[in-house]
Image: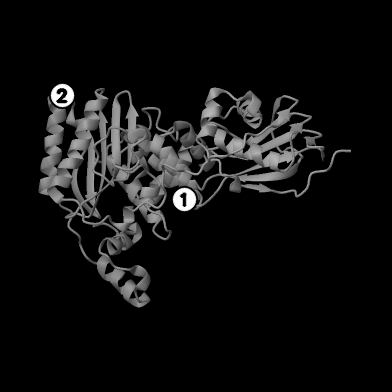
């Protein structure tokens, strides 16, 4: 029997049943949880779902693919519906990012923002920093051209037009998904001076809010990486997008460098594995990670663990105004990125995974008769387009059998528009000094 209370499934059941928990009398709600926890819920698979999965496996077999390395787990609420090699860790590719997302939300709140501090080592006279400009990062995985342009414009707003000294890169400052200090420093220096922009930067600027200025800051010196703390006077505090928005963008495009930076911020792959296993309530042996992105076949996750992590993410958001749909691309809505050309049932939050011989898909599908159906499919084979088509067909057949809901369940209603992430917002740059010294 499943431990209903510790798994958090009572709250999920109440929501799916349409019960408003906020309006429940406290003792009534507690008694209801106690009664539910004493029930024995059906654990037998669903014959129809089993038949559809068997047809799916037969299709793969006719292509020469062994069913033993094709992992499937279907679950409706706490009821397993169909399975195949469900507890076997398989190369899961970017399903690893589900673990990285879950671990991140065990460390930080969804609204957490990574702070980057811009400081100076000398006075600002006549619009020129008489010293060095110091950029101290704290692990922001999504500082890109638009963020740098907005930061440069804030410097211009303060009256700063030049730096007599060098650009010092300190802490964990990353840019454009690069982590090498010299490279990111050159990016930042270039972004601050629009006269040196490339076509790539010009294009990114063109996608920002119409009328966004082009910064003009000339840094006379060079880029200098600096280990440890640099003694400087902070002048601007830059805040990243909220963590939930960063995770959403990472998963829409399956951005590997973003995932690696987030995993490093958490404490590395081993810590991601531990946090994800604990939060999902699955054996650690079913989650084997060597990195946070899934680029290597040594990253292995069982289908059951993938579903467990998705459900754990839903539970981690149940006391917020966010849902699982705010973390992952949604079929039929976020059609850019990894869902381009996919035929997954609409409104399903999902995560894809791809290596040269791996195709994986996990998420949750809304149905009329079975409510939310959580699933994971992990395939081994090199015909990636064919594997994706078969995955989509499997989900379509299930929805054809169970029907689509008349209204979208609240548990998967999105509140964040992944197509408009709000990058380059100057309101996230807080000026810490009020005046600039006049020229002498």
Of callouts 2 and 1, which one flags the residue occurring earlier in the amino acid sequence? 2
SS type, badge 1? helix
**Whole-percent x and y of residue 255?**
44, 33
Q: Which residue is mark 1?
A: 106
Q: Quick one: label 2, few (<14), some, or many (20+) residues within 10 Å?
A: few
Q: Is residue 50 left or right of residue 143?
A: left
Q: Is residue 216 left or right of residue 97?
A: right
Kindly give the residue lying farthest to the right in the view shown: 440
**Whole-percent x and y of residue 73?**
23, 43
Task: State the quadrant of the N terminus.
Answer: bottom left
Residue 246 lies, with reference to residue 410, above or below; the image says above
Visible residue check, residue 45 = no
Q: Nearer the viewer, residue 388 or 81?
A: 388
Give the quarter of the image for residue 411: bottom left
Q: Which numbered tag is attached to residue 63?
A: 2
Residue 415 lies, with reference to residue 87, above or below; the image says below
**Whole-percent x and y of residue 372?**
25, 52
Give the quarter of the image for residue 205: top right
Give the quarter of the image for residue 265: top right
Residue 83 lies, with reference to residue 386, above or below; the image says below
Residue 216 lies, with reference to residue 415, above or below; the image says above
**Disc number lying in front (2 or 1):** 2
**Whole-percent x and y of residue 117?**
67, 42
Q: Nearer the viewer, residue 416 or 201?
A: 201
Kindly report the distance in space between the C-alpha atoms of the residues bearing marks 2 and 1: 41 Å
């Amino acid at each position: 029997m499943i431990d209903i209370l510790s798994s958090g499934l009572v709250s999920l059941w109440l929501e799916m049943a349409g019960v408003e928990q906020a309006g429940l009398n406290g003792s009534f709600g507690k008694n209801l949880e106690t009664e539910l926890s004493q029930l024995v819920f059906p654990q037998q698979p669903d014959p129809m779902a089993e038949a559809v999965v068997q047809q799916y496996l037969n299709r793969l077999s006719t292509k020469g693919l062994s069913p033993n390395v094709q992992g499937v787990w279907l679950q409706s609420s706490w009821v397993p519906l169909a399975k195949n090699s469900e507890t076997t860790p398989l190369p899961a590719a970017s399903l690893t990012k589900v673990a990285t997302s879950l671990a991140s939300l065990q460390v930080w709140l969804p609204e957490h923002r990574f702070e980057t501090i811009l400081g100076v080592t000398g006075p600002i006279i006549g619009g020129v920093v008489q010293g060095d400009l110091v950029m101290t990062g704290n692990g922001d995985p999504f500082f890109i051209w638009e963020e740098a342009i907005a930061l440069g414009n804030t410097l211009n707003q303060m009256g700063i037009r030049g730096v007599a000294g060098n650009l010092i890169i300190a802490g964990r400052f990353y840019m454009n998904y690069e982590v090498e200090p010299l490279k990111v420093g050159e990016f930042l220096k270039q972004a601050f001076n629009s006269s040196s922009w490339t076509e790539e930067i010009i294009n990114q600027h063109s996608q920002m809010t119409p009328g966004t200025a082009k910064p003009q800051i000339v840094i006379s010196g060079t880029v200098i990486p600096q280990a440890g703390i640099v003694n400087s006077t902070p002048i601007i505090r830059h805040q990243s997008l909220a963590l939930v928005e960063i995770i959403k963008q990472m998963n829409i495009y399956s951005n590997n460098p973003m995932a690696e930076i987030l995993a490093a911020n958490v404490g590395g792959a081993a810590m991601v594995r531990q946090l994800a296993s604990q939060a999902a309530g699955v054996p650690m042996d079913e989650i084997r990670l060597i990195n946070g992105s899934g680029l290597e076949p040594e990253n292995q996750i069982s289908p059951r663990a993938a579903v467990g992590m998705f459900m754990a993410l839903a539970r981690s958001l149940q006391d917020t105004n966010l849902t699982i749909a705010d973390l992952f691309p949604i079929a039929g809505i976020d059609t850019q990125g990894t869902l381009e050309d996919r035929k997954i049932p609409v409104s399903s939050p999902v995560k894809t995974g791809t290596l040269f011989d791996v195709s994986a898909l996990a998420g949750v599908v809304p149905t009329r008769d079975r409510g939310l159906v959580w699933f994971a499919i992990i395939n081994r084979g090199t015909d990636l387009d064919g594997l994706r088509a078969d995955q989509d067909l499997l989900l379509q057949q299930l929805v054809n059998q169970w029907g689509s809901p008349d209204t979208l369940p609240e548990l998967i209603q999105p509140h964040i528009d992944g197509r408009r992430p709000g990058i380059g917002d100057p309101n996230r740059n807080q000026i810490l000094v009020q005046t600039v010294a006049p020229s002498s």
